[in-house]
Amino acid sequence: MFYLIPAVIAWFTAQGLKHLIGMLGRNRRIFGDSQSRLLPSGGMPSVHSATIVAFATYVGLVDGWQSGLFGLSLIFAAIVLYDAMGVRYASGRQGELLNKMAGSMKKPLSPIPVVHGHKPIEVLTGSLIGVVISSIVFFTTI
């Protein structure tokens, strides 16, 4: 169960940074794109990346880089990172385009919900947060 500690800390850290960056950036809204969405998807940094990389890094530090659990964690992390940058990013762009097209019709359709993915820099930043948090947790609890 202690494997989850750095992952949870990384999640809170990245989510807090995302809200801070959002408040200081263009939208200046505490809750992201919409006041009804407390945890918006997409944006800087990637919370998914921070969480899964923190978990995988901590497993590697505790169980060793050659352990089966680290190998499994690494594969799972790669899938999450790929999905955040590739599939979710592309589907978010497609959703925005569909909403734009639907709004320009003679009888506009209701907009579809759009889930945003991440740009590579957002995934990299989230991943770095995960490595740093796991390292801090590991080296302060030895």
Image (tube, rainbow, N blue to C red):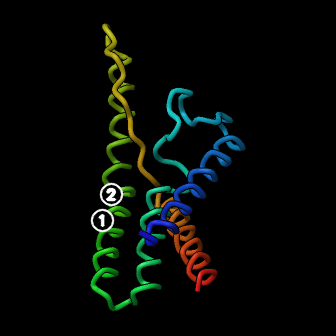
- Determine the residue located farthest toward the top in the rendered image: 107
- Determine the residue located farthest toward the right in the rendered image: 24
Label 2 sits on what residue type?
Asp
Local SS, label 2? helix
Q: Is residue 134 left or right of residue 65?
A: right
- Where is residue 103, by image quadrant? top left
Label 1 sits on what residue type?
Ile
For label 1, count other residues whose C-alpha is less than 10 Å away and answer few (under 14), some (14-19) or many (20+): few
- The quadrant of the picture occupied by the N terminus is bottom left
At 46% from the left and 77% from the top, the residue drawn is 57
Whether residue 36 is situated above or below residue 42 in the rendered picture: above
Compare residues 71 and 127 and report the one nearer the observer.
Answer: 71
Compare residues 50 and 134 and report the one nearer the observer.
Answer: 134
> What's the CA distance linking mark 2 and mark 1?
6 Å
At 39% from the left and 33% from the top, the residue drawn is 96
At 27% from the left and 84% from the top, the residue drawn is 68
Q: Pointers 2 and 1 in contact (CB under 8 A)?
A: yes
- Where is residue 76, by image quadrant? bottom left
The label on residue 79 is 1
- Identify residue for label 2: 83
- The quadrant of the picture occupied by the C terminus is bottom right
Where residue 56 sits in the image (x, y, percent)?
A: 41, 74
Compare residues 114 and 69 and report the one nearer the observer.
Answer: 69
